[in-house]
Amino acid sequence: MKTDWRERRHRWDIRYAPYAYIAPYFLLFAVFGLFPLLYTGWVSMQDRNLLDGDAATFIGVDNYVQLLTADPYFWNAMGNTLSLWLLTTVPQILFALGIAQLLNRRLRGRTFFRMGVLLPNITSVAAVTIIFAQLFGRDFGLINWVLDLFGAGRIDWQAGTGSSHTAIAAMVVWRWTGYHALIFLASMQAIPTSVYEAARLDGASAWQQFWRITVPMLRPQIIFSTVIATAGNMRLLAEPLLFNPGAAAATGGSDRQFQTAALYLYEQGFAKFDFGYASAIAWLLLIATVAITGLSYLAARRIRTD
Amino acid sequence: MRRTPTLVGAGLLAAALVAAGCGSGASDGKTRITIGLFGNFGYQQLFEEYEKAHPDIDITDRTASYSDHHKNLAAHLATNNGAADIEAVDVGYINQFKANPGQFVELGADVKDRWLDWKWEGSLSKDGKQIGYGTDVGGLAICYRRDLFEAAGLPSDRDQVSALWPTWEQFMATGKQFAAKAPAGAKFFDGGPTVLNAIVGQAPTGYYDKTDKIVVGDNADIRKGWNLVAQGVADGLSAGLLHSTPQWNTGFKQGQFATLACPAWMMAKIKDQAPETSGKWDLAAVPGGGGNWGGSYLTVPKQGKNTDKAVALAAWLTAPEQQAKVFASAGLLPSTPKLYSEESVAKKQDPFFNNAPVGKVFTDAARALKPQYQGPKAGDVQTEMGNAMQRVEQGKQSPDESWNQFVGDVKRLES
């Protein structure tokens, strides 16, 4: 009788204990991920002031219709987000591949350099942005000073669309390239040397080895990095916000030239207190993120493995 | 019983968490009053004075930038969590907050007589609830750099300077004289949006009419000011800096501009940003006379745990005696008119501004001030207007194009 009970408990343990072990994650996800997501969806169908939730009225999909058909600033913000996504993701991955390749050689103080590339990533994003905003300053910025030395003239980085996107992309790329480089480096070291030896015997140059062997072998990591970078860049907020300090920070420049979708959400929710409208932007941004992440996954998957 | 250690560990962890939770209360038996501020309110000495008189109170202040502060406050009110016991609110945001008076403690009207009438009414909700005690009012003057004026061959004596510009047209004409002989790198004013704010602050009607309708697009006074400032920008008088940005702060240190529209609180900003320019500045009358820009209120959010003590502190901080002390230390203009005739205020001079009679200039300005009605989203309209003028300054649009976009932008605020 007693053994039977122990036996049964043992079988229960084996069958259900794994669920108990992973339960905390799913509980936390439900509380901090799923619930806010659904609640945001509910709020997005209301006309609701941030400060006065009691006076909210249900308006169905009006916010979405307004955003998609009658709000040029929303489309402007989506366009800026896409532009910044292209300007950050592609260079990030390419630079990271190059740096990983360099770090994979026999260097003096290898560990020092390998750890060094991660430093930008662990610095506070606010500090990074404030320093970059100074570097890109119009009158006394270091970059304009250098441009001036070479007679290229000064650029009002914040004023233009292309120039402001370049400056913001520089901050993001600087911050994240090292992170991706370390991921690539780790998997480069797992590629068997015999493959390269065989290639060398066949007369493949270093460049050919890199494109024909290293890059295809890194495919899963490149896919991972692209997806991570894409998801991160779709919610780009701190860099454009802090690049434009002052009372008008949330508009992303005098003509919204670098207002990202996340920044537009912030402006609607926390400057104009239009909570329902901001929630609708959040949902559209989620949909766009899923779509674009899917696209970049498909694109990265096209790297050939043969 | 191999699981025991885990259970004990979990128990300890839980106990530690509970202990940590309890630890956040004041352990020395004092009541902690937090106060959320932006910029320099000149309160540090007052806090010490109050703590000495009330040994059971411990005051903690936290200061953020102007826009961060107000956005944080909105978020804390919306989630009913995290607001300080006392929260400062600028006049640009007070209307948005007073539209929901239920989130603030209603303050007693027994001390109503302390304030300028329009200051009291500025934070009174439509149903007659008072949510904020007035701190300072802006008032207006022009701060100018004596050394740069001299270098450009202009008079530097403050009375002579004031006589140069009875109107904004003459202010711009002086600017052209300045530009003709100015030292390299020095412009006449800091940026178009700052000057425009001063001009808007003088108009009888600002962005809104009294029915809360945005009328800025049809406001002839503002359009006239817009054209004037846009012309000044085209004439090369503007340093193209947006106030309260790091570039603007650097502009002080580098002497990039010779004049600045100066509400009283702006003087504290200049001292904070460029202490090394002490003595080079002076104070002249504002063109057009009078006018207001800025000024704040202290509110007490209902979610606080010690609202009674917070109200007492807010009332004390905004009492005439304390406003006089703030004026003496930080130069913020009191909102309590009985001080304007007191010697300590009216006769105050400021060595940073070449011993300018700041007391007289600002009390005169405050007396001449005709209050302007501020609608619910005045702060947002001001932001859009600043952006619009900046587009002109950056050469992105012509003044007319930018004005038309501005009018469209503020229409969206109403919907």
Image (tube, helix red, strand yellow):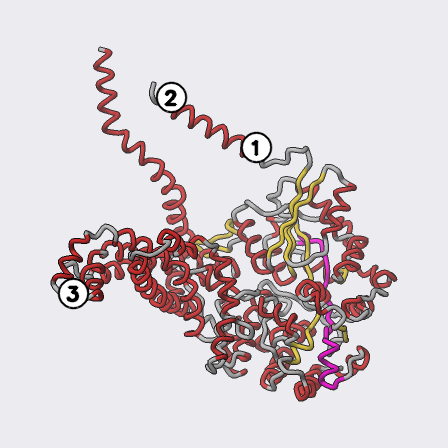
Q: Is residue A3 visible?
A: yes
Reading the image, the residue beneath label 1 is B22
Q: Residue furthest front?
A: A108
Tell me the element at label 1.
Answer: helix
Q: Residue at x 18, y 63 (%)?
A: A212
Percent from the top left, x then y, of residue A291? 29, 59
Disc 2 to disc 1, C-alpha distance = 27 Å
Q: Is residue A287 visible?
A: no
Tell me the element at label 3.
Answer: loop
Q: Decide whether residue B142 is among the magenta residues.
A: yes
Tell me the element at label 2.
Answer: helix
Percent from the top left, x then y, of residue A78? 38, 66
Q: On what subunit does the disc labeled 1 rest?
A: B
Split into 4 quadrants, where in the image is the N terminus of chain B?
top left
The image quarter containing residue B211 is bottom right
As displayed, is residue B410 above or below residue A115? below
Reading the image, the residue beneath label 3 is A204
Q: Earlier in the sequence, mark 2 or mark 1?
A: 2
As displayed, is residue A120 above or below residue B311? below
Q: On what subunit does the disc labeled 2 rest?
A: B
